[in-house]
Amino acid sequence: MESRPVVPFLETARLRLRDCVEADLERLLALDNDPGVKRYIDGGVVVPPEEFRAEALPRLLGRGFWAAEERITGRWLGWFELCPKNGADWRVVELGYRLHRAEWGRGYATEGARALVRKAFTELGTERVTANTMTVNTASRRVMEKAGLSWVRTYVEDWPQVIEGSAEGDVEYALTREEWRLAHPGRLP
């Protein structure tokens, strides 16, 4: 059976975002099992392959998750999320990203996040983009801010694992369609 080419969801100057597919399994698993990448998610706990296939993979292959590749070389960088918070309703979406540590500090997260925010407001009918991270995850918070999102609140939840910095809680950031329109005159009707 001939496989069909994967059509990009979004392209930027340096990135191509496309659906995550089964062929990405080993790359997704390796990224998920990098303790540095998952430091602020679960403290870097290694996930057995069978657990990853059963729990994380279906979510990553589903609606709202895209593999990130370098546009020119096709090198796999990680993934981005722009996922509806309520089923198929794109009015409120969650923004997320997870990139290989070797790609940190190169502006890929900011470039992808900005492009997804723009697509959400100009093409998907989104009214609000949200994002969350640990309070101590200053690098991720900076990406959210560069993408136009603003701090909404700090909150504390009971998580299964206590990890370094969790006592300071998590933060929610958000950007509304109207706020984006005011910051980008002429881009929305």
Image: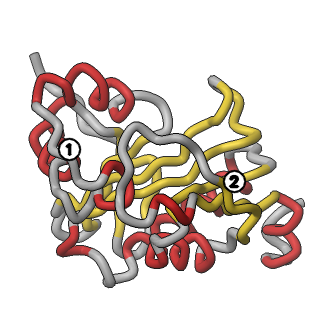
- Element type at marker 1? helix
User: Looking at the image, do the residues carrying marks 1 and 2 touch, with CB atoms under 8 Å apart?
Assistant: no
Q: Position of residue 107 (x, y in %)?
A: 39, 81
Q: Which mark is residue 118?
A: none
- When the figure is inspected, residue 1 is found, relative to residue 44, above or below; the finding is above
- When the figure is inspected, residue 142 is found, relative to residue 69, above or below; the finding is below
- When the figure is inspected, residue 60 is found, relative to residue 131, above or below; the finding is above
Q: What is the image's colouring?
A: secondary structure
Residue highlighted by disc 2: 129
Q: Nearer the viewer, residue 4 or 26?
A: 26
Q: Position of residue 134 (x, y in %)?
A: 50, 62
**Residue 109 falls in which quadrant of the image?**
bottom left
Q: Residue at x 12, y 23 (%)?
A: 50
* On-image quarter of the C terminus: bottom right
Relative horizontal placement of residue 142, taking residue 106 as reference (left or right): right
Q: Nearer the viewer, residue 70 or 136?
A: 136
Q: Amino acid at mark 2?
A: Val
Q: Nearer the viewer, residue 103 or 22?
A: 103
Query: Looking at the image, can residue 69 be seen?
Result: no
Could you give the CA–CA distance between mark 1 and mark 2, rounded to whole angstroms?
A: 24 Å
Q: Amino acid at mark 1?
A: Leu
* On-image quarter of the N terminus: top left
Q: Residue at x 74, y 61 (%)?
A: 153
Q: Position of residue 42 (x, y in %)?
A: 33, 49
Residue highlighted by disc 1: 28
Q: Residues within 10 Å of mark 2 (few under 14, many from 20)?
A: many
Query: Looking at the image, can residue 75 be seen?
Result: yes
- When the figure is inspected, residue 126 is found, relative to residue 56, above or below; the finding is below
